[in-house]
Amino acid sequence: MRNMTSLNWQKSSYSQHGANCLNVAISPERTPQIYLRESDCPEAIVTTTPARLADLLQKVKAGDLDRP
């Protein structure tokens, strides 16, 4: 696994000051990976691709993942 301290983590502009902030980092490799973590638990990291994250965001915006 990649050395997570070498990544340039950025806080989401939608996060409020304090807790519950989403951090995102992009690997510099040829095939980029996107890393996501929650500020209160930075050791728990989710890795995805730009295409998969775009698909997730599209589904969230469309309400496809809302509970009935």
Image (spheres, rainbow, N blue to C red):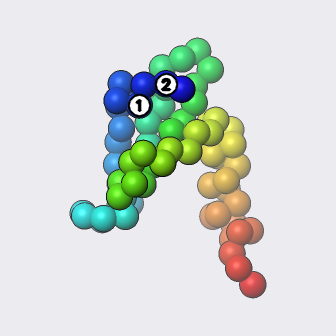
Q: Is residue 57 left or right of residue 42?
A: right
For mark 1, give the secondary structure. helix
Vertical placement of 1 versus 29: above or below?
below
Residue 12 visible somewhere in the drawing: no
> Does residue 47 sit above or below 67 in this rendering?
above
Q: Identify the residue shown where x is 24% and y is 63%.
A: 17
Q: Which residue is mark 2?
A: 2
Q: Quadrant of the rendered structure where residue 64 is?
A: bottom right
Q: Is residue 18 above or below residue 34?
A: below
Q: Position of residue 41 (x, y in %)?
A: 40, 54
Q: Quadrant of residue 63?
A: bottom right
x, y percent for residue 9: 36, 38
Q: Quadrant of the C terminus?
A: bottom right
Foreground residue among 53 and 39: 39
Q: Residue at x 41, y 31 (%)?
A: 4
In the rendered image, which quarter is residue 43 located in? top left
Callout 2 crowding tier (Cα within 10 Å): few <14, some 14–19, many ≥20: few
| Residue at (64% x, 63% y) in the render | 60
Left or right position of 40 against 64: left
Tag 1 residue: 4
**Residue 40 appearing in the image:** yes
Q: Are marks 2 and 1 in contact (CB under 8 Å)?
A: yes
Q: Residue at x 63, y 45 (%)?
A: 53
Where residue 61 appears, as percent x and y from the top left, is 63, 64
Inspect the image, locate mark 1, and give the three-letter code of the amino acid beneath it.
Met
Specify the amino acid type for callout 2: Arg
> Could you tell me how far apart the alpha carbons at marks 2 and 1 are, in whole angstroms?
6 Å
